[in-house]
């Protein structure tokens, strides 16, 4: 097996926990890299559309969108926004929901796939997240996406042609099909070494420990792994019995 | 340190109330209490991360 650890990440640009989870994951990878089991970590992002029916343009604030979409009072929607913005700030992200341009993300996913072909996927993902959550830049319109892509070194005309012809749409759909095959219902979702799944914006310590655990499991036989699983199931059953 | 444990293939790090989770092709490495996640057009935060009410989930904006 390759010595590096492969992490496939399913996320959506319009997912607040995905950006927060990205920061926490990166901190976990850094801690893992400083530890005794350090290995190179190869990260690849995959497409997941949380809300494919979202329009490209919405005139109004995020609180108003939430209020209309979910039937909530605007004040309650604003409280929710303030809550998540506060958590983002705890990982040094500065979500600006007043400036945020709510939009459909399928084209942004196509740009991420194009960037992958040019070896710039990680830069593109980061640029799109900060554009959406921190800078109030539009990540659903062709021209804006072309500008964002050009800022990380992609050819602007190639981006526009890609979006015009939907040449990366099949790649987006393939990612979504793989997510479905894995049974992924929510994001962020991390698949490590193609076998182990981690759901949600876990804390950095959890990511670090999972990476160390996966490396340790490489030296584990299937029989030992089955025993560990049986012990885990027994522990869970015992816990359930105690709380019953 | 967050307690991370190995769970079986039917396990889940997310208990969102309806018990809906299945990742047949993956072994799931989980942390007790779950972690913030977005599903569909809703995003959730375990209340335990805010106020210690483990098992409850609050909706936040997507």
Image: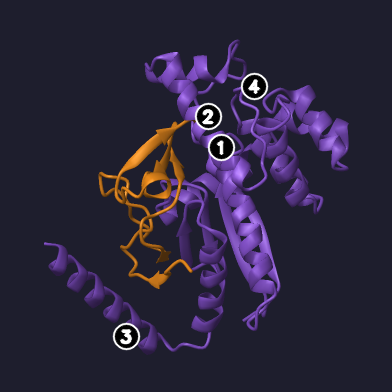
Farthest-out residue, top: A59
Q: Which residue is mark 2?
A: A82
- Residue ID at (49%, 82%): A217
Q: Which residue is mark 3?
A: A227
- Secondary structure of residue under mark 1: helix
Residue B39 percent across, percent down from the top left: 42, 40
Horizontal placement of A182 versus A140: left or right? left
Q: Chain drawn purple, letter?
A: A
- Residue ID at (39%, 34%): B59
Q: Earlier in the sequence, mark 4 or mark 3?
A: 4
Q: Which residue is mark 1?
A: A86
Q: Label 1 marks which chain's residue?
A: A
Q: Please tell me whether mark 4 or mark 3 is closer to you in this view.
A: 4
Residue A198 in view of the camera: yes
Residue A13 percent across, percent down from the top left: 61, 37
Q: Are marks 2 and 1 in contact (CB under 8 Å)?
A: yes
Q: Chain drawn orange, letter?
A: B
Horizontal placement of A174 versus A30: left or right? left
- Secondary structure of residue under mark 3: helix
Front in this rendered view, residue A86 or A188: A86
Residue B58 percent across, percent down from the top left: 37, 37
Q: Please tell me whether mark 4 or mark 2 is closer to you in this view.
A: 2
Q: How is the image coloured?
A: by chain
Q: Are there few (<14), some (14-19), or many (20+) residues within 10 Å of tag 2?
A: some
Q: Which residue is mark 4?
A: A101
- Between the residue at mark 1 and the residue at mark 3, the CA separation in whole angstroms equals 42 Å
Q: Earlier in the sequence, mark 1 or mark 3?
A: 1
- Secondary structure of residue under mark 2: helix
Residue A196 percent across, percent down from the top left: 47, 67
């Amino acid at each position: 097996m390759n010595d590096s650890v492969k992490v496939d990440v399913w996320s959506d640009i319009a997912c607040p926990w995905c950006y927060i989870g990205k920061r926490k994951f990166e901190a976990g990878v850094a801690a893992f890299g400083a530890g005794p089991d350090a290995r190179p970590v190869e990260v690849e992002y995959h497409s997941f559309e949380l809300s494919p029916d979202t329009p490209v343009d919405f005139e109004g604030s995020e609180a108003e969108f939430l209020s209309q979409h979910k039937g909530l009072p605007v004040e309650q929607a604003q409280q929710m926004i303030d809550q998540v913005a506060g958590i983002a700030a705890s990982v040094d992200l500065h979500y600006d929901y007043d400036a945020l341009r709510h939009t459909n993300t399928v084209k942004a996913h196509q740009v991420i796939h194009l960037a992958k072909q040019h070896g710039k996927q990680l830069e593109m993902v980061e640029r799109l997240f900060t554009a959406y959550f921190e800078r109030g830049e539009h990540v659903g319109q062709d021209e804006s996406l072309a500008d964002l892509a050009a800022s990380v070194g992609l050819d602007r005309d190639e981006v526009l042609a890609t979006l015009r012809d939907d040449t990366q749409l099949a790649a987006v759909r393939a990612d979504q099909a793989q997510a479905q095959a894995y049974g992924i219902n929510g994001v962020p979702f991390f698949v490590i070494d193609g076998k182990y799944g981690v759901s949600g914006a876990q804390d950095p310590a959890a990511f670090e420990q999972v990476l160390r655990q996966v490396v340790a499991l490489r030296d584990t036989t299937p029989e030992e792994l089955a025993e560990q699983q049986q012990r885990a199931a027994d522990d869970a059953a015992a816990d359930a019995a105690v709380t019953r | 340190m967050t307690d991370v444990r190995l769970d079986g293939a039917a396990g889940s790090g997310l208990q969102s109330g309806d018990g809906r989770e299945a990742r047949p092709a993956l072994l799931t490495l989980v942390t007790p209490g779950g972690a913030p996640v977005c599903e569909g057009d809703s995003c959730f935060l375990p209340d335990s991360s805010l106020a210690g009410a483990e098992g409850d989930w609050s909706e936040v904006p997507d």
